[in-house]
Image (spheres, rainbow, N blue to C red):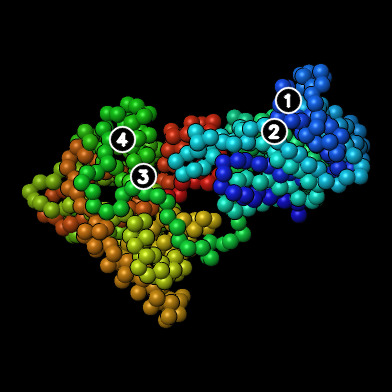
Amino acid sequence: MTLLRVRPGNLCRAHELILKNFSSPAISIRPVSSSSPAWPWKQVPKHSMDSGVPSASDTQPPLDVLEMARQAQTDVSTGNGADGDIDTKIKHVLSSIPAHSNQALSTEVTSSDNEVQLESVSKSILDKSNLDVEGNVTDLSGSAIKKIKSSEDVSFYNYVHIRPFKYPAYWLRDNCQCTSCIRPDTRQRMVSSFSIPKNIHAKSVFQASPGQINVIWSDGHMGEYSMAWLDSHQMPSEVTHSNKVLTFRNFKHRRQAKSHPWVNYEEVMNTGQGLTLWLQKVVDWGYCLVKGVPVTPEATKQLLERIAFIRETHYGGFWDFTSDLTFKDTAYTTEALGAHTDNTYFSDPARLQLFHLLEHTEGEGGETLLVDGFYAAQRMLIEAPHNVEAFTDYAHPWHSSGNEHISIQPYVYFPVFERDPTTARLMRIRWNNYDRAAKIDWTPYMAMSWYSAARHWNAILLRKDQTQKWLQLEPGTAILFDNWRMLHGRSEFTGKRRMCGGYINNDDFLSRYRLLKNGRENTLNQIGTYKTRLSV
């Protein structure tokens, strides 16, 4: 299978592209010296690299090579020419690319030399302004091709990343980004994946403009790909998640802190900046308080709906409840609740959860407990890695069967620690000892391994000075937290408490967060990349 291969070099901020030509005779490309006053490329004799001197014709504006290629592929797709003419049309386009064009590389078609070499004289060093806080490239417009060799592989060398990536030719053709293949406004496909020839391969690859790579495919289509798109759509290595050590995203909240992250209700409700700040703090810290909330269920519901639709469950949509056991669940009692996550019995647990204490009369207690589950998992990995393996590898049954008309169970068993199958990053914690069912499909050794991990996990959750964070909720202050990351609980209380709140689904939350943070255009351009997943 033909592959587009991404491979690292060193960790300098240079981006280089090695592309291999598939046609025969091969394409021979040679550079001009860096002193060229016009376009960065010049066609010169094969054995006189770096000796070319720009002529008067070198300063002429380039022809529209892209339009010529599009016309060639249109002729083929509309039947204007026999199928056997595809190679002829492609070669005609390639041989018509003007020397030192700013749209495409100049070419010299030969019938003997099977190697294609290109040296870039355009800028390829990215300054620090193009890097985000994690060192990822955010602007690849300065990237350039380094050299091309003719073989069955197309290779893209990227010096920022630390391992090679491979792109199958069929995949790359199927994901062409031109406006004939992808609808610009919705980013939906317009071409059937199954109309692509099974043996599709690249005939030639060239730099159409700074930061833009075009591929002429064996079916006559010209694929268009930006360097930024290629970089953000790199494929993972062949290492499977089962061979990887559990990893963690950088996060701020690790243990006791003197203050809690918070935002103002009016700013959240009236400004996009306030809403973005609220969600960003939840992403960073795992939770965030909202101060100044009117002490009514109506205002609280509007606050939650500021994010997205409220999730409906067997508890209803938006809750407004007291400790009267309306639903047969320990949450509807006055008892203390240990640290847990909600919805362990759903195949897709809710991502966000909001509480607002409307009143607490004739009693005391009921402090809210928060534990950063990711930090607790990291402690377990440091102290006993084999226990992390048990919590990751052994799936467990969960259920909710308190009321007569329901018995909710996930469609498959899930482990306590769920990780991203590609990166091995901890994605979600599913822990509620109240809702755990008896597991039978394991050996005695597996069972004892899991219980050893569970005892260790419980001990970590009980460490008051290391993992537990307590706060007393008050009317007018709501709390929103990440139910995939933060475990919550409460102390026992007396008197009457009235609480309200609700859930938000993961997909709805991330949709809102992405668009607020990145804008629609950037979000659409990153569809399918790790940047848009934010599973933790």
> Which amino acid lies under the numbered mark 2 shown in the image of this protein?
Val
- Disc on the earlier residue, 4 or 1: 1
> Which amino acid lies under the numbered mark 1 shown in the image of this protein?
Ser
The Cα–Cα distance between marks 4 and 1, rounded to whole angstroms, is: 60 Å
- Disc on the earlier residue, 2 or 3: 2
Q: Marks 2 and 1: in contact by CB < 8 Å?
A: yes
Task: Determine the residue located farthest toward the front in the rendered image.
Answer: 51
Residue identifier under label 1: 36
Element at badge 4?
Answer: helix
The Cα–Cα distance between marks 4 and 3, rounded to whole angstroms, is: 20 Å
Q: Marks 1 and 3: in contact by CB < 8 Å?
A: no
Task: Determine the residue located farthest toward the bottom in the rendered image.
Answer: 444
Q: Residue at x 60, y 56 (%)?
A: 237
Residue identifier under label 4: 303
Nearer to us in this view, 214 or 519: 214
Element at badge 2?
Answer: loop
Location of residue 225 in the rendering, given as x and y in whole percent from the top left corner: 67, 37
The Cα–Cα distance between marks 2 and 4, rounded to whole angstroms, is: 55 Å
Q: Residue at x 41, y 46 (%)?
A: 505
Location of residue 424 in the rendering, given as x and y in whole percent from the top left corner: 49, 58
Residue identifier under label 3: 284
Q: Marks 4 and 2: in contact by CB < 8 Å?
A: no
> Which amino acid lies under the numbered mark 4 shown in the image of this protein?
Leu
Question: From the viewer's perspective, is the residue at label 3 or at label 1 nearer?
Answer: 1
Nearer to us in this view, 264 or 259: 259
Element at badge 3?
Answer: helix
